[in-house]
Amino acid sequence: MKWLRFLRKKKEEGELGKEGNEQSNEQVKEQSNDQSNEQVKEQSKETEDKFGKFKDKFLSLSKQLFSKNLLTFIRGKLASIQIKKVLKNPLTVISATLLGVLIGVYAEEIAILLGPLGKMYLYFLQMSVIPIIISSIVSNIGRLVSSVLIKDFLYRGIMVFFLACFLSSFLGVFGGLMFKPGSDLSTENQEILNSVIQSSEEEIDLELNLLTPNITETEEKSVLDFLSEIIPSNVFESLTSGRALELVFFFIILGIGLGMIRKEKGSQMIIEISTAFFLTFQRIINWALYLLPFGLICLVSNQIALTGTAIINPLVKYIAIFYVMGVVIVIINQLIIAIRSREGLVKSFRETIEPNLLAFTTRSSFACIPSCVQSLADRLSFERITTNLFIPLGITLGRYGNIFYFSLTTIFIAQIYNIDLSFNEIMITIIGSIMAGLATAGSTGIATLAALSIITLPLGIPLEAILIVLIALDVVIDPMRTLLIVNTNLMSGAIISKKFTKTRGKNILLDV
Amino acid sequence: MKVSLAFFSLVLVVFSSGLLAQDMSDSPSSIRNLIQKNELIVGMVKQDQPPFFFLKNGQLVGFDVDLANGIAESLGVKVVFKRSADSFNRLIPQMLSGETDIVISKLSRTLSRSKFVKFTKPYISFRQSFMINRLGLAQYEKTHEEKLTYDFTKFKGRLGAIKNSSYVSYAKNYFPLAEIIEFDNWDKVVDAVFDNEVLVAYRDELEIKKIIKSRPDAGLKVQTVVFKDTKDDIAIAVRWYENGLLAFLNNYIDNIPKAEVDFLINKYLNLGEK
């Protein structure tokens, strides 16, 4: 308070001084001769002296204050470092998740109250996602274009992307054919599904014209339609509606353009500004991640409290297959990360648990981008430019969890309707799932599920009724789907990026 | 005391018979005849047609039963249900021969019937409806260029309907390209659709909604379509020359709330509780 009052006083003095100056200026004009000019100078000198006195006083006072504060500040800093360590500890994060589960199961009312807090946390994470995607692409692609890393990045990136797409799709089909999630649906379970379908908000009774053609409002999108939609006709529209795929396309082009004119004045500055933005948003996310345990308690408990258990029974086999296979894929991914990072299984798992848990609990793969980048670049010290660039691109385009989900679910629906798929039809399922996965690039949540029609339409599998069931079930499936997207992208990032190692204080690129 | 009571009842009889006599002489003969014989014989088919008329715990109940009771009550006569006809078309000659007075039997107001009898305004109106096998539909759309739901008049698949019902003639009229397969009864049509033996079953929305609400596999297996631009009017039939009675019935129908299909199902059938 003392300090504030002092400041105010100083400000008033300053203003007074100004007025004095102005008055004297007017005098100058009236008299309009050289002598008066000197007078003015003397006057202004006097005011400067006054200022100087105040300045000294102010500085000495603030020094005193600061030195007092400094001690407490350091003390607080020490304490907060310990708290930060505790908050960031994987054990804290895991136990927060478990606590969330317990609250969700045993204290539904509290869980529902926590819902809005969880949402606030999620929104805070999502707030910085679009700027991070943009700034990381702009700042890194310009550098990449001019560096030796580009060849590796493109070559490995494309290889890993297609291989991971194919494997995800293949594993889904394999799991579906092997473990048969959709066959032998009992009458009791059929009744449960029936009631879900009947009570859905979607209109299942179509009301149409008999005698005149019915113009359908929603046309199914073909893969070509999807491709033509990558290019934004108005990038500002894509920005305001947050269409990630269009933005990625635009800013890749922008980044390449910037890389091309890097000798021109100002281009380097744009890249540097983008980098500064990127780091700023990383920092913002980092603050939020300290609160992750609290966010998790709110998100997890609310999610569990709101999940109806009735629908799980008839689909328990399907859910189990999806989760068990999902866990197997995650374990394989973690093994690859461990090998690539040369850190050992336990440490690499420890350093990547944050993005994985974040994916599983927030069900938003985009919200995990900053955490993924930190895990790979900061904690496992993978090469920074490729990591920074690959993770946003990979998470936007590489919807591996969706691909796995699509292929497994297509087989599941075929089994429910007792359709025996021929070899050719299985091939169509594998390829169609990859295409459907690409079509969901940049989209999240339930909008994803409608892309199933890309596969079911050419196969002649009825989708509408099951889609209602799948939408109701998605609360259960979505966490694993998001985890598979994020985890497989972490693995891909680890394959694409080279590893840094610290020898004698110098960062040296390991050629792996 | 006894004398005064007898006198009072005598006055009452004379007075009321006078009133009746006056009523009868002024009202049309069709109504007068009913009041004279003090009963309204309602023709209904043998087979139960829930929720219109059906036996529940040995008692005849349903929407048509309530309607007939209400009409008889406002005429001041008692109601008799005659359920000897074994088909809807059999009800018409039965009434014309004088066995019944009116027909309230979920009877569709068709042109062919209008040649013999007069119909009231519809007391309920159904839209025509399709019940489509989902698997069949998906495979139909895989093999055909145009979606079935885009233009139904171009429907080329197998269509099931009840033999000799009005829906067979509707189908021939509206779906010239379809292969129409007639079944002995509705249950067989429904089974055929659920087994994908025919692609669609064609009937009114009420019957199709009943199936949807009663079969546990309906949600997964079939899709319903209600045709907005069609209707199946259900009305009361009277002999063609009984205009007075017709006017009375029309007036009665105007004075009761208009019934909806969902209302009928919810009021008379507890399908959901099964």
Image (cartoon, rainbow, N blue to C red):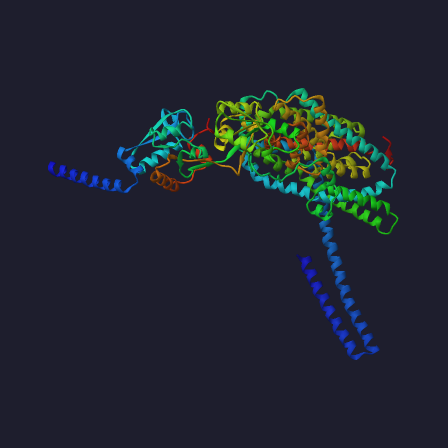
**From the image, which quarter does the C terminus of chain A lie in?**
top right
> In this orientation, does residue A368 appear?
yes
Q: Position of residue B244 (x, y in %)?
A: 33, 40
User: Image quadrant for the N terminus of chain A?
Assistant: bottom right
Residue A287: x %, y % from top left: 70, 42
- Quadrant position of residue A231: top right
Relative to A209, say whether B179 is above or below.
above
Q: Quarter of the image holding residue A87? A: top right
Residue closer to the observer: B208 or B189: B189
Q: Residue at x 73, y 65 (%)?
A: A14
| In this rendering, position of residue A345 left or right of residue A446 | right
Q: Position of residue A108 (x, y in %)?
A: 55, 34
Q: As drawn, is B144 to the left or to the right of B65?
A: right
Q: Nearer the viewer, residue A53 or A486?
A: A486
Residue drawn where x is 76% and y is 61% of the image: A55
Q: How many marks?
A: 0
- Residue B249, relative to residue B166: is it above or below? below
In this orientation, which residue lies closer to the viewer: B196 or B92?
Answer: B92
